[in-house]
Amino acid sequence: MTEKIGRAARAAASPGTEIVARNPATGPDSIEGYFDEAFSVPGLLREIAADPGADAYVIACFDDTGLEAARCAAAAPVIGIGEAAFHMASLLAHKFGVVTTLPRSIPAIENNLVRYGLSSRCARVRAADIPVLALERGEPATLARLEAEIFRSIEQDDAEAIVLGCAGMADLAGSLAERFGLPVLDGVACAVKLAEGLAGLGLRTSKLRAYATPAAKAYMRG
Amino acid sequence: MTEKIGRAARAAASPGTEIVARNPATGPDSIEGYFDEAFSVPGLLREIAADPGADAYVIACFDDTGLEAARCAAAAPVIGIGEAAFHMASLLAHKFGVVTTLPRSIPAIENNLVRYGLSSRCARVRAADIPVLALERGEPATLARLEAEIFRSIEQDDAEAIVLGCAGMADLAGSLAERFGLPVLDGVACAVKLAEGLAGLGLRTSKLRAYATPAAKAYMRG
Amino acid sequence: MTEKIGRAARAAASPGTEIVARNPATGPDSIEGYFDEAFSVPGLLREIAADPGADAYVIACFDDTGLEAARCAAAAPVIGIGEAAFHMASLLAHKFGVVTTLPRSIPAIENNLVRYGLSSRCARVRAADIPVLALERGEPATLARLEAEIFRSIEQDDAEAIVLGCAGMADLAGSLAERFGLPVLDGVACAVKLAEGLAGLGLRTSKLRAYATPAAKAYMRG
Amino acid sequence: MTEKIGRAARAAASPGTEIVARNPATGPDSIEGYFDEAFSVPGLLREIAADPGADAYVIACFDDTGLEAARCAAAAPVIGIGEAAFHMASLLAHKFGVVTTLPRSIPAIENNLVRYGLSSRCARVRAADIPVLALERGEPATLARLEAEIFRSIEQDDAEAIVLGCAGMADLAGSLAERFGLPVLDGVACAVKLAEGLAGLGLRTSKLRAYATPAAKAYMRG
Amino acid sequence: MTEKIGRAARAAASPGTEIVARNPATGPDSIEGYFDEAFSVPGLLREIAADPGADAYVIACFDDTGLEAARCAAAAPVIGIGEAAFHMASLLAHKFGVVTTLPRSIPAIENNLVRYGLSSRCARVRAADIPVLALERGEPATLARLEAEIFRSIEQDDAEAIVLGCAGMADLAGSLAERFGLPVLDGVACAVKLAEGLAGLGLRTSKLRAYATPAAKAYMRG
Amino acid sequence: MTEKIGRAARAAASPGTEIVARNPATGPDSIEGYFDEAFSVPGLLREIAADPGADAYVIACFDDTGLEAARCAAAAPVIGIGEAAFHMASLLAHKFGVVTTLPRSIPAIENNLVRYGLSSRCARVRAADIPVLALERGEPATLARLEAEIFRSIEQDDAEAIVLGCAGMADLAGSLAERFGLPVLDGVACAVKLAEGLAGLGLRTSKLRAYATPAAKAYMRG
């Protein structure tokens, strides 16, 4: 999965942008819901601490796991792939639909949309009921379920663009866009572009209140 | 701090309710912002896993750190002291004010209020600019700052009740309520009462979608 | 109906809590919509005036009829069974569904949810199209309608918990929870627990602005 | 007060519109907060029942007391003077300010604005701290307070129009508009015009759900 | 179309009100979406400039095209037929449904509802998929589609009143109201009544901030 | 002004991006409020029609004048500099402040924030009371006013990042960011980066509903 995401990021990157794809040393294999999220954040923050010189960081989990903590930890900008796709889709459509893997992931995505302010731009968050790791095997039935849910998002929810709600769907965006005739956004690609944009302008996370740099913490090592 | 919180919880508890106050073995000494939060959650979830027979769990950090993950982990109800105070205050006043310790904690509290749906009930979240651990030393200057901010919440924001935005303020609620002549809510006490209420009615966290029980996870041990 | 509600309240109450169930001397037999509400409030306020020593008051109409006026009238906390169930359900589920009796009651419940701030937590308010007084006769057809609507709330609205939208459904919560495998909340029980909690902590309604005590009023007698 | 309101209504009415100003036989002398509201509604509904042939009804209390119940009771349209002024002001300004009499009235007005959907159009609800009945005596100090609060609404809240938050201020709208150079709206006049408009178009309250006609009720007589 | 709208306006007007129906000299034949809107506004503003003595102006396009600019341009009140119908419907029903012509018009109407603050009062905006100019030919199939969509608005969205989302539907309001037994609002008639009301009270657009009068502009002539 | 904006865009652009800065042949010299906006849109749409081969279009007016119509007109993505800055700021701060030129521009910016969904992310929109064209002369008093308003945005509104609310402020972003120690965003630069990002990913405006391509229109020539 890490490799696949790295490939998607490199495909989106501009010439001159170097992508380093890392999987935290600790934490779950895939993130399906709040519980997995909680155990993945410390490893994620240690990865950031281990590579403090990056121009920007992308959190390649659609739940934007640990986004706020990472913004505290890093000097450079941090982008979640969920928020990246939501912001980009808002520039292309009146309302976008989100199609994710499992029903249990919907509430976290809905909460993120509310926190970002973009829930009024989202027609509905849907789940195709596909386990994250099953996406990797690329079975036809998996794709059929995903397409059926995209169809419902367009027909029943009036979505004008589709956001793919899982990093593991990155390689499907192009063919789905062609098939359905509307923008289909993969968060990994969107986040790479936003990261390039912010870094290119020299913009960095505000350290004024929410994301103030924490003092060096002994417990990070544990 | 753990002891102080335990005392506050016991003072609020009904006869027959046993309070077990625990501090996670790993994680920061105090929680001031998103970064500290992130490192405290795994320890918190391990404490819950270590004591699966409790009738209810209270997360005694005003940011409601790890609340959603804990709800996945536990069968019994889980209450955050922040949400507990917000819900209780909503039953006593048209609008309540929140006074917390540090300005950097305000955004997390504001995000929680939006997520819970109760931001329209909160007049404003204010910070008295007091470090969490300084509260324990109980210096007069600390109290004066807190009172000044409560005064502003009532006069400028039209708050009709005050929520104390830190577990370390639990012992001040009574005297502040008397001094200002309005309800002053401590989240620890509120959470104990809500926990007793839910447990007494046999109500448990829904396992249907958001808080579905995760499969047993090897990484929890690490 | 009053007796049935009293029994439900007593079943929920902790040892040591005394429940006094009263039906106002004036007003409609059941409350179905805004018009009935209006005529029930003066009687309700006279009941409170007649028993000023209670530790807390519960308004056992799901519309929370007269809640604000009662908070002005009483020194002790006042809890509506609708708000009680909404707040409790928010602690157990990402989104809850409400199933009430008549379609004409939906708008008042929706308005209450907006006023309390909790409309974002409610998946949808549905009506099973059952007259309030028909609930008392307990016919099988009535139960079947209620169950069908709960099923729709879970399947179509993604509710993770169900709030029963009528005091007359209090005795059904347990069996429905078992049948559907999720929390089913009865407002009477929830309100009793919240009343016990607030009273136990010595918390009382703020008298600062919205609920300031009115001067003694001659017209109350009329 | 009833006479004064009648005069204001007649001054606003078109030729051919007959205004009948009535004060309910029961209920409080003035309405200051939720408690007074509760006792005024049955009398108000009896007045409507006593005059079923009116083309429209105006509830001349700025809290829009009993508005929903009155809509159930009447076949013809019912307009509250608060909502009338809010809707009219929305047609003249990006944001309007409301200046009412007592601080205790602010929460009810805020709740109405939320229910009507127009809270985003209101800059802020302010109180000049004037008892309702003091307005009738017309002392200079009362006017000075009102003007000071209007000034704050314009300067601090960026209001572009002012809604006078009490039927007793009806006669001041013209001179205040001239003094401050912006629209100053009196709810009585606005309600008369909206009532004339709806009646003129033959539009009546929907009886479909929220405002369905109640069955004839024995308790109305009591 | 201009003539038809003029007739509808005259039918709604009170005795003594003179209606002048004008079609801008430049701009599209009908307005279907944002692009047509953009080209119709300069012509609309020139019409207002050409007739500065009107007591009020009505913009007879349901998108309320150019409403804010027209409020800057005119001294007298300006009413859009969309907003007029939304405000009037809010006085008659808990929630209203909107049925417009083309799906591409829905987003602009939704955006207007959000801007006016009334989106919480609208059950849903629906399109009957009828071209604006086809309405004029009055074919039975067109009417059937419109009725089917009204039916869905009532049954599926719980609308209690219907707003017709196109000036070209003005002549159908009466018969549809009779057929469906609920208020059916035509924006032209509503706007005429609101314009009469504001003009009758001497109320004019606030010139304080949003709608401040622009300096005389050479480019208007071009 | 057009040249200045062109320079700012080129400074932000990546190597390989060609910037063509155009000023519409018709329309006002500067845009201050809704009235000027209305007359600038047709010229803007003609510029787009005259250059259909661009990879993306940036509308360099902070009001995002004509954004929706331009999205209908163009096949390639269209970005407004206002929305660009709002979205970028949302990635760097919990809340951002906006400082624009004239008070009369505030309502249009507030309406845009609501439409985009990002009003909850904006602390407050402020005006430094500087005419747009005065910015070009670069007098010290103008800068002092701007700085004073930024200071208030940080101190009184708790903004963590500042969005400069006028294309004419583009050259000040760097020095203000340094002076105040937080991100200061210029919409022109942000829009260039978002346009590069969308074009780089091959993403285009959805043509499904809101922004469907209009038929060729004769009136465009007039």
Image (cartoon, coloured by chain):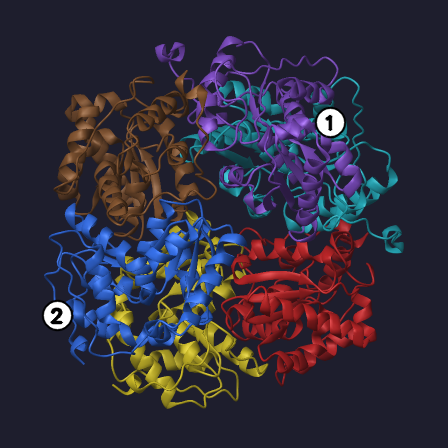
Chain colours: A yellow, B blue, C brown, D purple, E cyan, F red
From this viewpoint, is residue B32 visible? yes
- F109 vs F137, left or right, is left
- Tell me what residue is drawn at x 60 percent, y 36 percent: D101
- E30 vs A97, left or right, is right
For numbered disc 2, what is the local secondary structure?
A: helix
From this viewpoint, is residue B205 visible? no
Q: Mark 1 points at which residue?
A: E196
Amino acid bearing label 2: Ala
Q: Do the residues labelled 1 and 2 touch (CB within 8 Å)?
A: no
Classify residue A202 by image quadrant.
bottom right
Residue nearest the observer in this picture, F116 or A193: F116
Q: Name the residue under label 2.
A: B50
Q: Mark 2 lies on which chain?
A: B
Task: Check disc 2: other Cα within 10 Å, few if <14, some if 14-19, many if 20+.
Answer: few
Residue A90, horizontal then vertical, whole percent: 52, 61
Residue nearest the observer in this picture, F34 or D4: D4
Residue E98, horizontal then vertical, whole percent: 53, 36
Amino acid bearing label 1: Glu
Which quadrant would the C terminus of chain B be assigned to in this image?
bottom left
For numbered disc 1, what is the local secondary structure?
A: helix
Residue B181, horizontal then vertical, whole percent: 41, 49
Placement of F42 over or under A203, stated as above or below? above
3D distance between C-alphas at marks 1 and 2: 73 Å
